[in-house]
Image: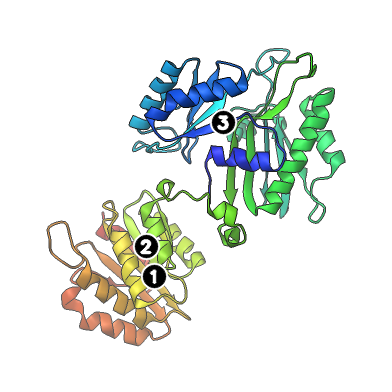
Amino acid sequence: MKIHEYQGRQLLASFGIPVPAGTLVESIEQAATTYKQVAAESGSDLVVVKAQVHAGGRGKAGFVKLVRSAEEAEKAARFMLTNRMVSVQTGPEGLEVTKLLFAAGVDIADRSGGGKEEFYLAVTTDRATRRNILIASRQGGVDIEQVAHDTPEAIIKEPLHPLMGLQPHQARRVAFDLGFKGSQINQAAKIMAALAKLFEAKDCTLAEINPLIITPGTATHPDGQVLAIDAKFSFDDNATFRHKDIQAMFDPTEENPAELRAQRFGLSYIALDGNIGCLVNGAGLAMATMDIVKLHGGSPANFLDVGGSATEEAVTEAFSIILSDHNVKGVMVNIFGGIMRCDVIAAGIINAATKHKNPDGSTGFKVPLVVRLEGTNVDAGRKLLADAKSSLPTLQPATDLTDAAMKVCKAVG
């Protein structure tokens, strides 16, 4: 599960991490008034307007703007709320923007040697060591993946103790290595410690601040202030039941409607960009199915795991979800029956075929359907499909996984 930046800022603030003040805007009419409010509270006419979507690349797409008047704020809001945001992370179809964050603009101190004092900070899980890890870099404000690829030496990694978490001496060492000085060191170390605690307390899979910045020095803060400007969070879906506050942040408008529909029936579905729909039982078998489809020249349109205890109704819904994707030109069913019975799958296939409506108003499957069944009640399942041949004219039975993949790839060309 992901949340918006404005919600991430709220989480940071609740754990004592300093963030600039901000207000949520959901209409063009709110823009001018909100700008005046944020500017008055911050004592500066500089306000940043940021689209709230679950995708990066907002700045380059023109969906992060600095404004210095109510008129500029209204113009920025109108542009963002009436245009879809297209970036490298959204695909050509882009994303609709319905929420904006109006936040106080912050001056960033200049870095000796050029550039601004911007840093990257995150806590995530290192699968190689099976430990949570703090990741930091002086090269904040840019794609950290590109930094890691081009200059891996610029990435600092500090493993967290499984029981005690990030220790104070670790946080201070990272702060020194990042180049913080004077009072900045304690500020940065406290932020790192708080971020690590937040990550653990809320069952995050990623807790990221990018950029973490230093403001220019003032009379009251000679070394400047260390502030979190942007936040990105992901949470373990299997643990959100423990966090009602996180559940309340879920925004269904940012999710794929088909994936939400699948969840209601206990199906694990992820839309992909191929043209061969896959219906499989078991996550590992689903991954193997997609791999073998690719091996034989095909392209999977989805990951769909019906699980081990899906009902006939759920299987019918699974087909409906797969075929609602207009890119699907063929469907491959790969079932190895253990708890899941092959006759239940077969009944679901037949039921789906009789209920599915095509764009021309007819019912039944118009795309090639390749079915491989093995395991519990396989003979009963195969008999059901054979007896229903009239309602399944596109059905091709397969003897094994390779046979199924070859047949469906050939059928869709």
Tell me whether circle 1 and circle 3 mark residues in contact (CB < 8 Å): no
* x and y, in percent, of residue 187 in the image: 79, 31
Q: Is residue 273 left or right of residue 386?
A: right
Identify the mark at residue 278; answer none if there is no mark: 2
* x and y, in percent, of residue 76 in the image: 41, 23
Secondary-structure class at tag 2: strand
Q: Earlier in the sequence, mark 2 or mark 1?
A: 2
**Quadrant (top left, top right, bottom left, bottom right) of the C terminus:** bottom left
Above or below 324: residue 6: above
> What's the coloring here?
rainbow
Q: Is residue 125 visible from the viewing direction of this image?
A: yes
Identify the mark at residue 334; answer none if there is no mark: 1
C-alpha span from label 2 to label 1: 8 Å
Which of 135 and 169 lies nearest the eye of the viewer?
A: 169
Outermost residue on the right side: it is 169
Which of 399 and 367 lies nearest the eye of the viewer?
A: 367
Identify the mark at residue 22; answer none if there is no mark: 3
Q: Label 2 neighbourhood size at 10 Å, few (<14), some (14-19), many (20+)?
A: many
Residue drawn 39% across the image and 86% down it: 377
Tell me whether circle 2 and circle 1 mark residues in contact (CB < 8 Å): yes
Q: Residue flagged by tag 2: what amino acid is it? A: Cys
Q: Label 3 neighbourhood size at 10 Å, few (<14), some (14-19), many (20+)?
A: many
C-alpha span from label 2 to label 3: 44 Å
Q: Label 1 neighbourhood size at 10 Å, few (<14), some (14-19), many (20+)?
A: many
Question: Between tags 1 and 3, which lies in front?
Answer: 3
Q: Residue flagged by tag 1: what amino acid is it? A: Asn
Q: Residue flagged by tag 3: what amino acid is it? A: Gly
Secondary-structure class at tag 3: strand
Above or below 113: residue 322: below
Question: Between tags 2 and 3, which lies in front?
Answer: 3
